[in-house]
Amino acid sequence: MSLETPVDTDRALAITAMACRFPGADDPGALWDGMAAGAVRTRPVPVERWRRDDADGDASPVLTGFPTAVATIDGVDLFDRRPFRMPAHEAKVVDPQQRLLLETAWEALERSGRSPARMQGSSTGVFIGLSSVDYWLLQARAGFPAASSPYVSTGGSPAVAAGRIAYCLDLRGPALTVDTACSSGLAALAQAGDSLRRGECTIAIVGAASLMLSGDAMAALCRLQAFSPDGVCRAFDANADGAVRGEGCGVLVVRRLTDALKDGDPILAVVRGWAINHDGRTNGLSAPSPTAQAAVIGQALADADLSPRDIGYLEAHGTGTALGDAVEAAAINTVFAGRGRPLQIRTVKTTIGHLEAAAGLAGVMATVQALRHRRLPPHPRFATPSPKIDWSTVPLSVETEPIAWPRTEPPTAGVSSFGFSGTNLHAILSGPPAGRSAGRHRGRRLHSADPPPEGRPVLFAASARSPSALRARVLGLIDALRETDAGPLAATAAATRMIWTGMPYRLAVVASTAAEARRRLDDALGPAGDPAAAATYRRSPEIVLYRPTAAEIAQALAAYGRGGALAPTLSTIRPAATGGGPDDGSAPALLEDLLALWRRLGLVTVAEIGDDGPVSNPDRPVGATEPSAEPVTLTPDQAPPRPPGPQTLVLALGGMPPASWLDRWRTDDGGRPDVVACLPGHGSPLQGILEAVARVYMMGADLDLAALDPYPRHALPPIASYPFQRERFWFDAPRHGP
């Protein structure tokens, strides 16, 4: 059992994405920057949150430990309810921790290369660590009547946190909230890993959050006498005098390693093993046990099929209490005794404070970033080694300057998280498999190692839940395209199609260069700054497919002259899995290829009309028929009158339907239905097809644009996350609120 042993990809996990809102760090990159600089993200206690007199005037000496500094985040009262379709009157009574988890989970899914708005019905699990109910406490103290809103019970219940994410995104895997106090986040990861191994879900959203909103809760915790009076975490130092409270939210997207490799997901790090246990009976419920902590580390190593000598670094629980640090160091010595070389230890709590329920995931994210950079950041506020720790049994090393990763290949680390509930967790992480780190192949197509040729048109797409969010998203894309050359242009377009689609306000443009894309996007915003091309239809239109005759296909292609060969056009937007071009290049074969393209995009029609072709049943994908149904053949003159319902759209694969047929499908205002032509006869066949896809998409059709010229997710370039349009939501009561 060593690092030379191949990883069991069915048991190991891949962390495919991370997102966070931590003190001083709104994304994992900022977290690393702060750690690498040795920054400390604490600040004076925010008086608008809570005051010492919130503790019912209790001035007993036990409150002398009330901290003067904590690690907080901004905007805990702000939330964008629209992506989650949450009514405003519900949003104001929903715990800000749940709202924070919703937004951060959305961002993590986007970072994994997925559109959260298109994950409905998937076997995605949600596993959340949450342990505080400060918002409920605030409401109770303010006399907010629980009976005034039907949403108070679900809005404040930690049990609902995971279910709310699953509900809002329509996910069908397990959804559960874990509360083991300070180890809740890592416990959620362990539960997710077990569920993935059992096949209960194929993707897991793993998150944790903690917000400090109640002065009463702060006062109660201060009675444990576990916090540093001056708000400084000095973990493993002789002057360590307590933890520093922090707050924030972290979310991971996790899959089985074998699935991530197969599906081309980005892989930030691999979770090779994990373990969970309890202290049992100690000299107090919250008193740690070195025996149990050592056991859980050993169990995690066994689960990972590794030995102590394989670990180069350990992200410690490291609260900064003299007793807690000494107990943890004793446990580490028990496991790693005799390994010979130093073991580097550190804790992210010295940078962002103790995030309580989210502390374990903060430690995981800090470790992932160190693995990715192959460097260990400095440990702030470490001057004199604690005399309560045996530094000789195992040469433990706490570095005050950044150093290169210790010599292990792949780089491998342990992460500990211990709760005052007595529940202990440990996980073993290593770097991604060779050649599969996220960002290593940015811009490479799924079915070709070469970038698409310069000047080939590509389709950009965006969507949002509000016009203002769509505008912000498009403006951000315009700015990003100022620095995009021809090489990654197609990859950037693919990222927008795979990540930014699925919501009702929409925009799509076809362009061959970055400059053209910027111009078309800018034109689409309109002079007033509103997205003039946003979706007109809130529901998908009823789509009728017009199947042309072979002669009409030939005539449509002839309009393009020598550039009208359709087979090469289709081969450039066909995944390798579907094979090569048409068998013989004949018009019927080309027509079938066009049908296959729309079928791959998931287009659903109410009818297919043509002179010589069968008609699919209503509400079936293009070209599909019920096995037991007799094909129905309709000519244009036999087209039925337009039924009542949504707007009708006619998609013509080639040629144009006769006027007599269009007259039968007039709209409510007496006009003819909109007609979208795949081969309009100008530009190039590829441009015509893409513009048809763009127009059908913008008119509200539920198209899977990720299936158009797909890229592996690990090859997508980074694009901006959803531009949340946040507003203040807080329960109606004076005096309280951040």
Image (cartoon, rainbow, N blue to C red):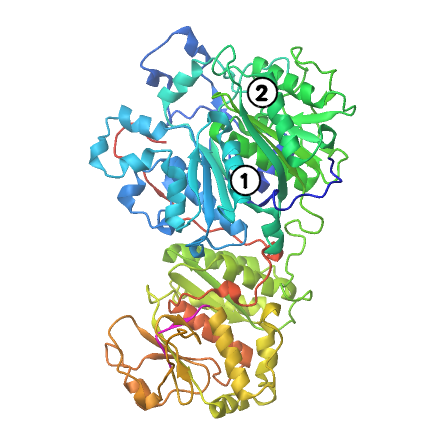
Q: Say which residue appears at 57% left-offset and 86% top-offset.
A: 564
* Residue 216 % position (x, y): 35, 20
Residue 346 lies in the magenta stretch:
no
Q: Which mark is residue 292?
A: 2
Depicted 478 relative to depicted 126: above or below = below
Q: Quadrant of residue 313?
A: top right
Q: Where residue 96 sits: x, y (%)?
A: 38, 36
Towards the viewer: 406 or 728? 406
In the image, taking residue 175 as reference, residue 258 lies left or right, namely right
Crowding at mark 2 (Cα within 10 Å: few <14, some 14-19, many 20+): some
Q: Decide which of 462, 155 is in the foreground and name it.
A: 155
Disc 1 target residue: 193
Report x, y in % for residue 167: 37, 47
| Magenta-tinted stretch | 602-608
Dot placed on the residue nearer the N-terminal end, 2 or 1: 1
666 up-or-down from 79: above or below: below
**Rendered residue at 79%/23% (across/down):** 340
Quadrant containing the N terminus in the rendered view: top right
Residue 316 visible in the shown view = no
Q: Residues within 10 Å of mark 1 (few under 14, many from 20)?
A: many
